[in-house]
Image (spheres, rainbow, N blue to C red):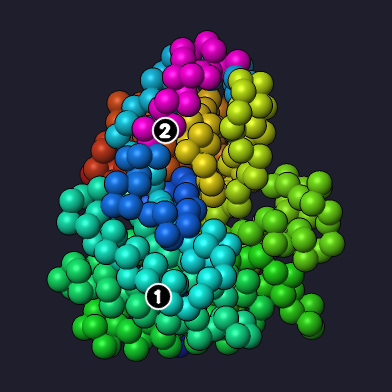
Amino acid sequence: MSDQATALGDLAPLLRRLRDAAARSGPGPGAAGHRQPVHTVYGGAHLFRAGTAARLGAVALRVLDEFGPDPATFARAVALPSGVPVEPLYQRVREKLTREPVEDFRLDFEDGYGHRPDEEEDATARSAAAQVAEGLATGTLPPFIGIRIKSLTGDLAPRAIRTLELFLSSLLERSGGGMPPHFAITLPKITAPVQVDVLADVCDRLEEHHGLAPGMLRIELMVETPQSLLDDEGRCPLGALVQAARGRCVGAHFGVYDYTAALGITAAQQRVRHPACDLARGLMQIALAGSAVHLSDGATSVLPVGERDAVWRAWRVHFKDVRHALATGFFQGWDLHPAQLPTRYAAVFAFFLAGRDIASLRLRTFVQQAAQATLVGDVFDDAATGQGLLNFFLRGLSCGALSDAEALGTGLSLAELRSRSFASILEGRRAATG
């Protein structure tokens, strides 16, 4: 419809205001258009090697062979819910651990590294950068990678900035100026937007000094303090934190244990599925809905080590934690140990395999009805559901839970799926039918 005069007068200025406001508000739900890893593996920066991802995958496969050597045993070990095809799930988990065991890795200079003499952390920053450069040259890095620096609070700020500077300069020197794709800097224990603003300034200076493209250094925010969810006036500052990153923010990660400790919750009760954590994750979703910021849940601290009963018990806790996150709209989480990789992928793959058939039917019916409201069984779908159904298949494809053939059961072509936009799919089909 053109911007024409009506009985209300010339609407063009009013419509321009709406378009300008929409442009300033950023992308809509699902519009980030980029793959989101299903997890981030955290490990001490001093332990990272160019082949760490493959080594973690090999350890995960050995643990799987010992404690879940066949589909039926593994299904019992994780208490796999009914309705999930056991054989395909097991084979896809094994294939994932062989092909791409780690999707995202964060070299940790904070809790996973601790406080050490400056000379030691300087040396670690350089040696870790050398390993990343080697992995970049040999193609052994995971698809996503980055570092977590110390917080920018109090006396730690100079140390955090120095580590970032040393790591980046050493990496670029060793790599001949190359950077890993999807490189991110994770900022922990944020209490005020100024900390994010300072990190963005540091990134500006580092990019200018090293001749990097503006915006190449991306920032992830750790949400692990009460002040990052509610300020002293009762307002949620997450939007302000993202704005302080000035377009660099790609993720917000929930820190379960620092957050629950700050609330006075005792160590025995600190867990991913604590009600206080559900509230925090809900606030994160509300504050960042419609943005391009990916949300990540925290870690399960019960590790699958020891005898069979201990491993199975830890696997079941981790499996339930991941399933809980997926059900509440958090498609990424932290892993701390290679033996958690089998249950990470089992939980993620089970989620998509169990929901595949009904989601496929709903999406196919919805597209066929040209996005008119539809009823499939007892489920009512309206226009807001279309992108969500499409995103289900995009996420399942990107992590290996679903195959191309299974996604094509939606009635969409691969080209339509790869467009990542439900609106553009409908436009294309309407154009094709005249």
220 relative to 135, above or below? below
Part of the protein shown in magenta = 57-76
Tag in front: 2 or 1: 1
- Alpha-carbon span between mark 2 and mark 1: 30 Å
Nearest the eye: 243 or 254: 254
Circle 2: is it few (<14), some (14-19), or many (20+) Cα within 10 Å? Answer: some
Q: Is residue 139 left or right of residue 291?
A: left
Q: Residue at x 66, y 78 (%)?
A: 191
- The tag on residue 122 is 1
Q: Residue at x 42, y 33 (%)?
A: 59
- For label 1, the SS is helix
Q: Residue at x 53, y 19 (%)?
A: 67
The percent coordinates of residue 27 (x first, y second) are: 44, 67
- Examine the structure image and report whether residue 66 is included in the region drawn in magenta: yes
Mark 2 or 1 closer to N-term?
2
- For label 2, the SS is helix
Q: Is residue 399 left or right of residue 312?
A: left
The percent coordinates of residue 252 (x first, y second) are: 55, 63
- The tag on residue 383 is none
Q: Residue at x 32, y 40 (%)?
A: 54
Q: Is residue 369 in sight in this rendering?
A: no
Circle 1: is it few (<14), some (14-19), or many (20+) Cα within 10 Å? Answer: some
The residue beneath circle 2 is 59
**Mark 2 belongs to which amino acid?**
Val
**Mark 1 belongs to which amino acid?**
Asp
Find residue 326 and report its image quarter: top right
Q: How many marks?
A: 2
- Examine the structure image and report whether residue 185 is included in the region drawn in magenta: no
Would you say the magenta stretch is mainly helix, strand or loop? helix
